[in-house]
Amino acid sequence: MIIAVDGPAASGKGTIARALARHYGLPHLDTGLLYRAVALTVERLGLDPSREADAVAACDFDERVLADPLLRSDAVGQRASIVSAHPLVRASLLQRQRRFAAQPGGAVLDGRDIGTVIAPDATAKLFVKAAAQVRARRRHAELQATGSSIGLDQVLADIRARDARDEGRAAAPLVQAADAAPLDTSNLSIEASVQRAIEMVEAQRNRGVR
Ligand code: CDP
Ligand code: CDP
């Protein structure tokens, strides 16, 4: 069973994907971390994220960077959406994600293009969304908890800029797959979001097309 969870920044996709993985006893991959690792490595090497060759050079990153707390920062998220627009960066990270999805027993992956590119034949696909204002408030609270002094207005502007880049790029843009179930978490608690997600996965599974 492969579960694909896609959606924009701070929509709740990671929280939902982790909960689904626990519920079904499956391994989980947050694919955004891979793009964040490339972005942080580009920065540390003094390279330019907007140059495709520079970003590709960082795809072979040191695995230890995946545990770096800086990975979760707003600035790295922004740069991740710059490196992720390069087709050769996406191609470089593709096999790693496909291998994870192909594990015996299955897997849960969350990102932007899981249902459209990485696992188009997934058993279940969710497209998680929420109003930009709500997402900015959630991400702002998270960043404050890590000691960041970034303002809410800046977080909202950054989320909007990232949405525009992720939706507007030519390579694997952020878009709801035709066969994905939409889940708007704007007015849902975490518990309610997870409950709804499980119901949607069950409905897609029982439909039994895959
Ligand atoms: O957690 P959040 O939604 O803020 O971001 P993330 O999932 O860590 O992703 C960071 C950036 O990586 C996104 O803005 C995308 O540009 C890129 N990304 C992507 O292009 N494809 C994916 N499957 C996952 C992330
Ligand atoms: O992975 P993504 O960036 O889409 O979002 P997330 O990391 O799962 O969630 C972003 C923040 O929103 C986290 O602090 C979640 O606890 C919170 N959240 C929420 O308040 N209500 C929800 N229904 C879902 C997530």
Image: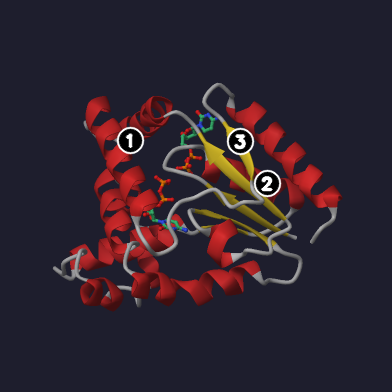
Q: Is the residue marked by circle 2 packed among few (<14), some (14-19), or many (20+) residues within 10 Å?
A: many
Count of picture labels: 3
Horizontal side of residue 19 vs 147, given as left or right = right
Q: Residue at x 60, y 69 (%)?
A: 100
Indicate yes or no: mark 3 CB to ligand 2 under 8 Å.
no
Tell me how far mark 2 sits from mark 1, CA to CA: 24 Å
Residue 20 rendering spot, x and y as whole percentages: 68, 46
Tell me the number on the disc at residue 183: 3
Tell me the number on the disc at residue 151: none
- The answer to whether residue 151 is seen in the rendering is no
Which numbered disc, 2 or 1, marks the residue that appears first in the sequence? 2
Which numbered disc, 2 or 3, marks the residue that appears first in the sequence? 2
Which numbered disc, 3 or 1, marks the residue that appears first in the sequence? 1
Indicate yes or no: mark 1 CB to ligand 2 under 8 Å.
no
Q: What residue did someone put label 1 on? A: 143
Q: Nearer the viewer, mark 2 or mark 3?
A: 3
- Element marked by disc 1: helix
Q: Nearer the viewer, mark 2 or mark 1?
A: 2
Residue type for callout 2: Leu
Tell me the number on the disc at residue 20: 2
Tell me how far mark 3 sits from mark 1, CA to CA: 24 Å
Residue 54 rendering spot, x and y as whole percentages: 21, 74
Q: Residue at x 57, y 31 (%)?
A: 184
Residue type for callout 3: Leu
Q: Is residue 143 above or below residue 43?
A: above
Horizontal side of residue 131 vs 51, given as left or right = right
**Label 3 with label 1: CB-CB less than 8 Å:** no
Furthest toward the top, the residue is 187
Quarter of the figure with the N terminus = bottom right
Q: Residue at x 44, y 43 (%)?
A: 8
**Residue closer to the observer: 209 or 49:** 209
